[in-house]
Image: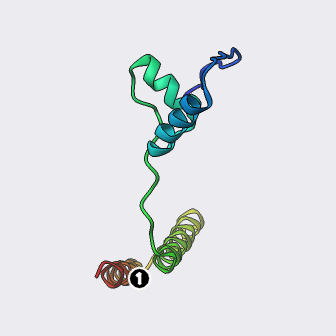
């Protein structure tokens, strides 16, 4: 389900001092929000729809997880092709590969969570 963005074709101009604008921008930055979004949330009394930034993750861990995901995709592709062609499947070999991928992911996670 996709959410439609609200129509924001209208604008609102507010006169303020340089000090007020700087103060408002600092508050918005402290909330990691653009000034317009911060003011909109303050005026509506509603929290912003923005999510927090994801936590920083070691790039090497992301690479290892991506490799495991690629392996899973290759296994799924091979299984689907074998199923469509009616070729026999070696369930034990597939299970062994999945167990090995699981072990590799656990080891990667443990090495980066210390």
Image side of residue 20 versus residue 43, left or right? right
Residue lying at 46% horizontally and 18% vertically, measured from the top left: 43
- Where residue 78 appears, x then y in whole percent? 56, 72
- Where residue 57 appears, x then y in whole percent? 44, 69
- Residue 31 figure quarter: top left
Query: Total label count?
Result: 1
- Where residue 96 appears, x then y in whole percent? 36, 84
Residue 109 visible in the current orientation: yes
Q: Does residue 81 lie above or below 61 as drawn? A: above
- Where residue 100 appears, x then y in whole percent? 37, 84
Image side of residue 51 versus residue 103, left or right? right
Q: Does residue 99 lie above or below 36 as drawn? A: below
- Which residue lies under the disc numbered 1? 97
Residue lying at 36% horizontally and 80% vertically, measured from the top left: 112
* Foreground residue among 35 and 64: 35
Colour style of the rendered protein structure: rainbow
């Amino acid at each position: 389900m996709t959410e439609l963005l609200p129509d924001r074709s209208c604008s609102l101009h507010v006169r303020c001092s340089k000090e007020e604008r700087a103060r408002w921008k600092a508050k918005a930055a402290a909330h990691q929000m653009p000034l317009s979004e911060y003011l909109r949330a303050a005026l509506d009394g509603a929290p912003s729809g923005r999510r927090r930034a994801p936590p920083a993750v070691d790039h090497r861990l992301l690479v290892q997880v991506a490799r495991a995901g690629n392996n899973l995709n290759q296994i799924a592709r091979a299984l689907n092709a074998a199923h469509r062609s009616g070729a026999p499947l070696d369930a034990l070999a597939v299970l062994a590969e999945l167990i090995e991928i699981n072990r590799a992911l656990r080891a990667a996670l443990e090495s980066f969570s210390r």
